[in-house]
C-alpha cells in the first residue's frame, strides 16, 4: 500500500532540458501531462484523456489548451474539455479532468500533487546557491528502480561515501564525524572531516592535497534535499576555499521507481567548459555507477517489502534517515485523516 | 476475468505467408498448433503435448499426424494419440487432445475455438472484394499489446483518422460525416466527405486533388471488419473512381494481446510492383507508427482495467464501438448460459 | 507453494571458473554470498546485509570476514557482525546472519541449505570418474527458465535423445531399451542399444561406425545425477571401448529457474585441445539449442502450475521421473514434519 504525501511540490523536469513539446511522466502513480501554452504559461493536467485514455502528453498545444492526439478533444488549463472537433453540433462533453498547479523554482518545473486550493508557495524548496550568480551547475536526471525513501536513506547517511565513492565523491579512507538535528520537519545531517584528502570531484578546483571538509545536508518533506559542501584550506595553505552546493529532488514515479533530479554546482572555474564536462561526468559516474546500482540492488534484494517491515539493523548513523521516515509517515497520516474528515 | 466468444472463427495466418512447417500461436489464451498434412488438409490441435507439455507446433508432420518433438508421441487430426514410438509394446496411450475445425477464407486460415460440433461455415466472414480478380492486396500482420476491443474501437470510429493519419490514410483537416446502423448483430459505421482532399495512400491511384470519399465499415462478431473505401471524382473531373476494399481480422491472443491480420486492396495499377510496395509500406506505417502505438498507449494507460469499468466519456461518434461491445457481451453471456445448461 | 529439500547439498559453482572475488546467487529462493577468506577457506553467508540489504557478494574479503560494500559492516564466517567502521565508539551491532556450510567435491563448490548442525558429508554426491586421472572433462553452466524437476524429468528419460539430439547425443533412429530400479532413494535408469550407430559427440573418439551403447543414469536427492556412457566395440571390431562419464548438478534458484552445472568427460584423447573444444561445443549445443529450449518451452506452456497438478499422460518410460518426484515429495514432507516438531 504505497502512501505518498500528496500536498507537496514535486520536481518534474529541469527547465533547460525541455523543448517546446508537452511532456508526460508518472508522479505518485498518476499520469501527468505538462505543457507550456502559447503565452508561455505552464500547466499540468491528468495525463490521460477521459475518452479513450490516450496520452495527452503526446498531444498538441492549441492556444492555452492541450489537444488529445487520438480524436482531437481539447482541454483547458483548468482541466475542462473545451472542444470536441468531431461533434456534429460542435458540442464539447461536460467533463473536467484533474489539473495540477505548476511553479518554476531553482531551474526546475514543479507540480503540486494534492488539492490545488492548498498549493502553498512557501513549501517550495528554498532558493539554492547552486543556481545563483557566481556558481556553475551541472544538471542530471536519472530514473532509479527503487522506492524514493531508499534514495533519501542514501543521501541522509553520507558515511557510505567512504565505501562507495572512493573514486568520485570521497577521499579514500576518511570516515567523517556526523552531527544530527531537526528544526520542525527539516532534518539536518552534517558531516565533518577536520583534516583529510580532497574529494576527487574537487581535485581540479582546490589547490592543495589536504583540507577540512564540511558537508551539510538538509532534507525537507516530502523528498527535497540540499547538500552544501565546503572545502576549507588547512592552516598555512594557500588554497582558496571551495563551495559546492547541490540539490537532490526526488519524485516518486510509483512505489518502486523514482525520478531523481540533481544539480551540482561550484564557485570556481565557472566558464571553463572542460571543467563543466569533468564535473558533470564525475557526478554522473557517482550516481549511475555507484549509488544507483547500489540502491537498485538493495530494492531488488528487498523485493516489494517496505524497509521497516523487514526489521533492519539500525545503526547510530541511521538517525537522520529514520527521522525522515517518521516525518513522512506522520505527514501522510495527517493528510489521510484530513481527507477522511 | 477475460470473456471471449468461443463459438466463432478466428484468423490465425495469411495462407501465402506460411511455409511447410506446422506453426503455433495462442488464441483466446489457448495454445494451438496448426498443420497441413501430407495430403494438403489443414488441421489444428491443442498446442501442448499432454505428456510433458512440449509444443506440438515445433513437431513434425507424419502422414496426417503431428509428432511431438520431445518424445515422439503422434496425434491424429481428431486429437487422438496414435503412436508412442518408445513404448516397449508399441502401445499408444489412450488420450485425446482438443482439435479445432479449420477453414480457408479470404486468403486466411481460420479456426473455430468452440465446440467442433457447432462449427458453422455461414459465420465465416463474407468473401471480400479485396481477394477477387481485378484487385491487388497488400497483406499485413502485427501483434498489438492491447485488448482486441480497443482495436475494434479504433476501427469503428474513423474520425480519429484526421488526427492520427494525416500522412497516410486521411487528407489533412477533413472531418467526415458519420452514419450508423445495425442489421442484426452486424454493425455499419459509414463515413462521408463530400468534397475533400485525396488520402495520401491513394495519391498515386487517383488522378485529381479533390474527390468525394465514402468509407463503409462493417463489423461482424467476434472481431472481423470489412472496410470499403471509394473515391468518387467530383463533377467535371476526369479522374477514374477508385475502390479500396480492406479487411481487418482481430484474433485475441490473450486479454491484452491481439493478433491483427489486415489486407488492403486496390482496383488500379494491379501489376505494378512499385505501387504494391508503396501501398504496403504506407499501410504498415499507418498501423505500426500511428494506430498501434496509440492503442498500446491507451492500454498501458488503462492498465488491465476494462474500458467500460473506467467510466470513459462517451461521445456521439462512439455509438458503433459501444454497440459492438454490447453485442459481444450479449453473445458471450448467451454462450456461458448455454454451456452451463 | 515451492517446496524444496533444504537439508541437502547444492552445487553453486565450478571451482575452476571462479576468480578471487566473492560471488552471489539465489538458491532455493534465498540470496547467498560465497567467498574464500585470506587463508583459502570457503564460507557462505546470507547474501543480504541486514542493515540496508545491500549485496554482500559485491563486498570485499577482509581476513576471514566479508565487508558490506555500502556502509562497511563486516561479518565473520559464522555470520556474526564483527565490525561497524563508522560507529563513533567502534561498536558492532549485535546481529548474526545465516551462514551455510561449504564443501568442495567433484570440482564444484557445494553449500548446505538446511540446519548447519545437520550438514552431512556422506550425502555429498559420490566422487565421479569424470574428475579422476585418465579422464578429461568439459565444464558447463547454464541457467534454465524452468523448475528443476523438469530438468530431472529430462535427464531421467533419455528416450527423448532419439527425437531431440540427433545431431549431438544420439545416433539417429536408435530407440534404446530401458531398465529401471531403485536402491533406497537412489534411482537407476539405464539404457541399452545392443547394436547401433555411434552418437555424434563420440564420433571422433570411437574407431568404428557401429557399437553397443550403454548409458546408466543415477539420480540422488535432491537433484544430482551421474550419467555413465560406455561404447563397446561389436564382435570383430578393432575399436577401443570408450567411457564418457558425466555429472549433472541442478540447483533451484527459485521455483521456475534452475542453475544447471554439467561436466562431460572422456577417457580418450585427453590432451587434445581441439577435441576438448569439440566436445565442449557439442555438449553446449545439446544443452543450449536442444534441451534447454525444450524444457523452457514446456515450462512456459505450463505456466506456473506444477506438472502433476496438470494430470499429464504417464508413459511407461516415465517411471524413473515419477519415482524421483515421489522421493522428493516424501523427503520434503518429512523435513517439514521434523521442523514443525
Image (cartoon, coloured by chain):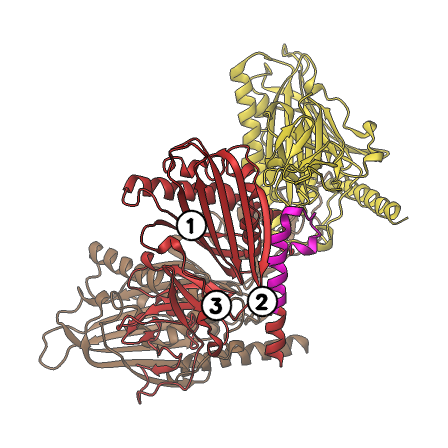
Chain colours: A brown, B yellow, C red
Q: Residue A73 carries which label?
A: none
Label 3 packing within 10 angstroms: few (<14), some (14-19), many (20+): few
Residue C119 visible at all: yes
- Cα separation, mark 3 vs mark 2, equals 67 Å
Question: To which residue does mark 2 refer?
Answer: A116
Image x and y of residue A252, in percent: 50, 65
Residue C310 lies in magenta, yes or no?
yes
Marks 1,2: beta carbons within 8 A: no
Q: Residue C123 carries which label?
A: 3
Q: Establish whether labels 3 and 2 are both on one chain.
A: no
Q: Which chain hosts label 3?
A: C
- Cα separation, mark 1 vs mark 2, equals 74 Å
Quick one: SS at disc 2? Answer: helix
Label 1 packing within 10 angstroms: few (<14), some (14-19), many (20+): many
For this rendering, which residue is in front, C288 or C121? C121
Q: Which chain hosts label 2?
A: A
Q: Which mark is residue C245?
A: 1
Residue A219 lies in magenta, yes or no?
no
Residue A267, image quadrant = bottom left
Give the magenta part as a residue range: C307-332
Main secondary structure of the magenta stretch: helix
Amino acid at each position: 500500500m504505497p502512501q505518498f504525501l500528496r500536498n507537496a511540490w514535486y520536481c518534474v523536469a529541469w527547465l533547460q532540458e525541455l523543448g517546446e513539446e508537452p511532456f508526460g511522466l508518472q508522479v505518485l502513480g498518476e499520469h501527468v501531462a505538462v505543457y507550456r501554452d502559447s503565452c508561455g504559461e505552464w500547466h499540468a493536467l491528468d495525463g490521460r484523456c477521459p475518452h479513450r485514455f490516450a496520452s495527452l502528453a503526446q498531444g498538441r498545444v492549441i492556444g492555452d489548451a492541450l489537444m488529445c492526439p487520438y480524436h482531437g478533444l481539447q482541454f483547458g488549463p483548468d482541466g475542462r474539455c473545451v472542444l470536441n472537433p468531431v461533434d456534429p453540433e460542435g458540442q464539447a462533453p461536460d467533463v473536467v479532468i484533474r489539473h495540477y498547479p505548476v511553479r518554476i523554482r531553482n531551474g526546475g518545473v514543479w507540480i503540486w500533487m494534492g488539492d490545488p486550493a492548498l498549493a502553498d508557495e512557501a513549501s517550495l524548496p528554498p532558493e539554492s546557491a547552486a543556481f545563483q550568480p557566481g556558481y556553475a551547475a551541472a544538471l542530471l536526471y536519472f530514473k532509479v528502480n527503487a522506492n524514493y525513501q531508499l534514495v533519501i536513506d542514501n543521501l541522509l547517511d553520507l558515511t557510505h561515501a567512504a565505501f562507495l565513492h572512493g573514486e568520485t565523491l570521497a577521499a579514500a579512507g576518511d570516515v567523517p564525524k556526523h552531527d544530527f538535528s531537526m528544526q520542525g520537519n527539516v532534518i539536518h545531517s552534517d558531516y565533518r572531516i577536520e583534516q583529510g584528502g580532497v574529494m576527487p570531484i574537487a581535485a581540479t578546483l582546490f589547490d592543495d592535497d589536504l583540507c577540512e571538509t564540511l558537508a551539510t545536508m538538509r532534507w525537507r518533506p516530502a523528498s527535497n534535499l540540499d547538500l552544501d559542501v565546503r572545502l576549507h584550506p588547512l592552516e598555512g595553505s594557500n588554497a582558496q576555499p571551495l563551495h559546492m552546493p547541490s540539490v537532490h529532488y526526488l519524485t516518486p514515479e510509483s512505489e518502486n521507481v523514482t525520478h531523481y533530479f540533481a544539480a551540482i554546482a561550484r564557485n570556481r572555474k565557472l566558464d571553463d567548459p572542460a571543467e563543466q564536462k569533468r564535473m558533470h561526468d564525475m557526478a554522473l559516474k557517482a550516481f549511475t555507477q555507484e549509488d544507483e546500482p547500489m540502491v537498485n540492488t538493495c530494492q531488488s534484494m528487498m523485493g516489494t517489502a517496505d524497509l521497516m517491515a523487514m526489521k533492519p539493523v539500525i545503526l547510530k548513523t541511521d538517525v537522520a534517515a529514520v527521522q525522515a521516515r517518521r516525518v513522512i509517515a506522520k505527514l501522510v497520516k495527517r493528510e489521510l485523516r484530513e481527507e477522511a474528515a
